[in-house]
């Protein structure tokens, strides 16, 4: 989550349901927290219920108040956040082909997790690599809870991605050492260094390109599109963003520069950049979004060769288009086209069989 999108992005209600379940096990009434979040109990009980980021954070505030200062409770709460709790965001990380790709997708769609925590990929001495946790975007009242919960939830996600105990070298965290240290190391399956200078999960660099057990390129592509659509729908609801996207689509092939785009909207380039920044966007982000979707259409629905597709998208060199498309999708344009053709080919082969059965 980000503060800018709290009221616009919807989340599965599973996070609140997990916290309600923990409160009930502790013999505490969840009703005050539900009221504080402005959520109807029926929405919590609905298996398809969705809540806003604002409601999620309001519930977290109330949850802290009900549980008191309870690092072990917060940590055990985090352990219950299995990958499937995150909807398409969890699915895309689980079905990514490699750990490296899973982390890239996690970063790309970071708006879709249940916290304001910032996560970054980090390198470490000795050939290690991992995930860094930065709690600075989180309000002070939520920060300690969010970090203890993340110790459980992020580690659980790694175990789910790996389909077993993830081979962590160690976990470092700036939090003070809790009373029940043994609980943390037992549940995390890794040594934990409390009071460290940074917060990070670290593992051997060689793991980055190991194929994941649930990796599946078709599923990864499907869930990646779903995540992108959720975020784009949220951001494009603002009239300015919608006008920018429409203008860029109309200028396809000779895309407006940032200055030309601003002029088409009767504003200065500086004003446009400021308003997009306020919404977590930039001119480059919007242009990449338009180009990526148009590239997918051209590769799937036309017989244009790659040079022609590249030129239609305004690239002067095929190599530049190939690098950009690989950055967007995780695979080359030719690989994407082969996969799309294979999928459509299988569908075409199935149709006569289905027709005969009817």
Image (tube, rainbow, N blue to C red):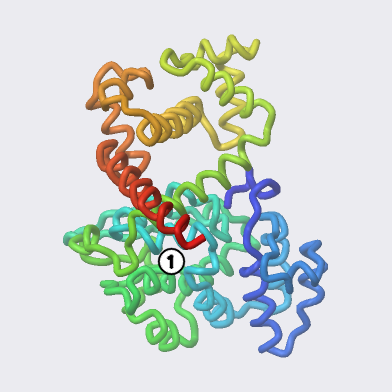
- Tell me where residue 2 appears, x and y as whole percent: 58, 48
Around disc 1, counting alpha carbons within 10 Å, would you say few (fewer than 14), some (14 to 19), or many (20 or more)? Answer: some
The answer to which image quadrant residue 97 occupies is bottom left
Q: Is mark 1 on a helix, strand or loop?
A: loop
- Asked if residue 341 is positioned above or below residue 129 in the image, the reply reads above
- Tell me where residue 313 appears, x and y as whole percent: 38, 21
Image point (68%, 60%), residue name: 50
Q: Which sits in the foreground, 163 or 349?
A: 349
Can you identify the residue that label 1 sits on? 174
The answer to which image quadrant residue 326 occupies is top left
In this image, 281 relative to 306: left or right? right
In this image, 96 relative to 124: left or right? right
Image point (29%, 72%), residue name: 168
- Tell me where residue 8 appears, x and y as whole percent: 68, 46
- Asked if residue 261 is positioned above or below residue 171 in the image, the reply reads above
Q: Which sits in the foreground, 306 or 21?
A: 306
- Tell me where residue 251 appears, x and y as whole percent: 50, 15
Q: Which sits in the foreground, 59 or 235?
A: 235
In this image, 249 relative to 174: left or right? right
Image point (38%, 61%), residue name: 95
């Amino acid at each position: 989550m980000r503060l800018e999108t709290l009221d616009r992005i919807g989340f599965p209600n599973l996070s609140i349901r997990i916290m309600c379940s923990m409160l009930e096990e502790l013999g505490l009434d969840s009703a005050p927290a539900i009221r504080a979040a402005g959520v109807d109990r029926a929405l919590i009980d609905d298996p398809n219920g969705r809540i806003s980021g604002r409601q999620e954070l309001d519930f977290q505030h109330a949850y802290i108040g009900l549980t008191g200062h309870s690092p072990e409770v917060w940590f055990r709460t985090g352990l219950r956040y299995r990958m499937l709790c995150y909807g398409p965001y969890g699915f895309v990380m689980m079905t990514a082909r490699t750990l490296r790709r899973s982390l890239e997708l996690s970063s790309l769609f970071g708006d879709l997790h249940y916290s304001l925590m910032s996560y970054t990929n980090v390198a470490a001495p000795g050939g290690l690599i991992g995930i860094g946790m930065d709690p600075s975007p989180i309000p002070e009242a939520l920060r300690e809870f969010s970090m203890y919960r993340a110790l459980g939830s992020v580690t659980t996600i790694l175990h789910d991605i790996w389909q077993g105990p993830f081979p962590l070298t160690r976990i470092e965290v700036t939090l003070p050492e809790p009373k029940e240290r043994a609980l943390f190391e037992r549940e995390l399956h890794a040594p934990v260094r409390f009071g460290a200078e940074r917060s990070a999960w670290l593992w051997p660099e060689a793991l980055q390109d190991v194929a994941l057990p649930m990796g599946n390129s078709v599923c990864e592509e499907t869930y990646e599109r779903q995540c992108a659509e959720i975020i784009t729908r949220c951001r494009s609801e603002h009239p300015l963003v919608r006008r920018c996207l429409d203008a860029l689509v109309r200028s396809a092939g000779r895309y407006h520069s940032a200055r030309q785009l601003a002029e088409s909207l009767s504003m200065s380039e500086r004003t446009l950049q400021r308003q997009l920044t306020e919404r977590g966007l930039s001119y480059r982000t919007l242009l990449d979004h338009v180009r990526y979707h148009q590239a997918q259409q051209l590769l799937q629905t036309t017989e244009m060769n790659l040079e022609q597709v590249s030129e239609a998208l305004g690239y002067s060199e095929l190599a530049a288009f190939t690098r950009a498309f690989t950055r967007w999708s995780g695979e080359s344009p030719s690989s994407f086209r082969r996969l799309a053709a294979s999928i459509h080919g299988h569908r075409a082969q199935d149709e006569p069989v289905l027709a005969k059965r009817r």
